[in-house]
Image (cartoon, helix red, strand yellow):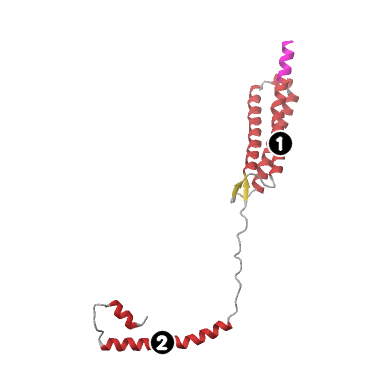
Amino acid sequence: TTVYQTITNVAPAAAAVPAPIQAAADALNGAAEAIADAIAPQAAGDAADQELIADEEAPRAVAEQTWPLLNLLLMAAAVAMAAIAFVRRRREEGAEAEAAADARHGEGTRRQRILTIAAAAAAALGALVWVFTEDFLGSMALADEYTLLQAVVTAAAVLTAALAMRRKDAEDAQEEQTALA
């Protein structure tokens, strides 16, 4: 569009454009056409010299890290079993404070203490494995490559905790049978 067309479109109520405005509009239109004519051949030459560059595929983000829920549950089970064995051991130690009871159950108490410590150590190892092998900033998944290791550590913790609790139960049952006989 020319400047004159713009002026007449903006002010359609004015029937006639004054001569000085018409002269200024013609001068601007002439200058604009001269600039366009000067640029057009140069742009056409530049287009011939330009090299086409193929579109490259945009790089994708690296797969997001995940941490497995199953490992968290296994670690929690190991810690819970060790805590139960430890609390039960402490409760039974309080009940057996007498020297006669310690002398009578010395070997069983020592074995139970060792198994309780082993269960706590296995649970601590499970917690360390979980902390050092998982990236907590990612999203949650069900399992990963460390799930088997976590399951083995949890099995060891649960087994030692169960043995620590079972030993005392078996000895108590045997004592009750001998006391009744």
**Residue 169 as seen in the image, left or right of residue 14:** right
Amino acid type, mark 1: Ala
Residue 152 or 47: which is nearer the viewer? 47
Q: Which mark is residue 20?
A: none
| Residue picked out by circle 2 | 33
Q: Which mark is residue 155?
A: 1
Residue at the location (69% across, 46% down)? 146
Residue at the top extreme of this rendering = 181
Q: Total of numbered circles in the picture? A: 2
Of the numbered discs 2 and 1, the one sitting upstream in the chain is 2
C-alpha distance separating marks 2 and 1: 87 Å
Residue at the location (63% across, 34% down)? 80
Quadrant location of the N terminus? bottom left
Q: Is residue 173 within the magenta segment?
A: yes
Rendered position, 121 above or below 24: above
Using the rendered view, name the quadrant where residue 16 is placed: bottom left
Residue stretch in magenta: 172-181
Residue at the location (71% across, 26% down)? 166
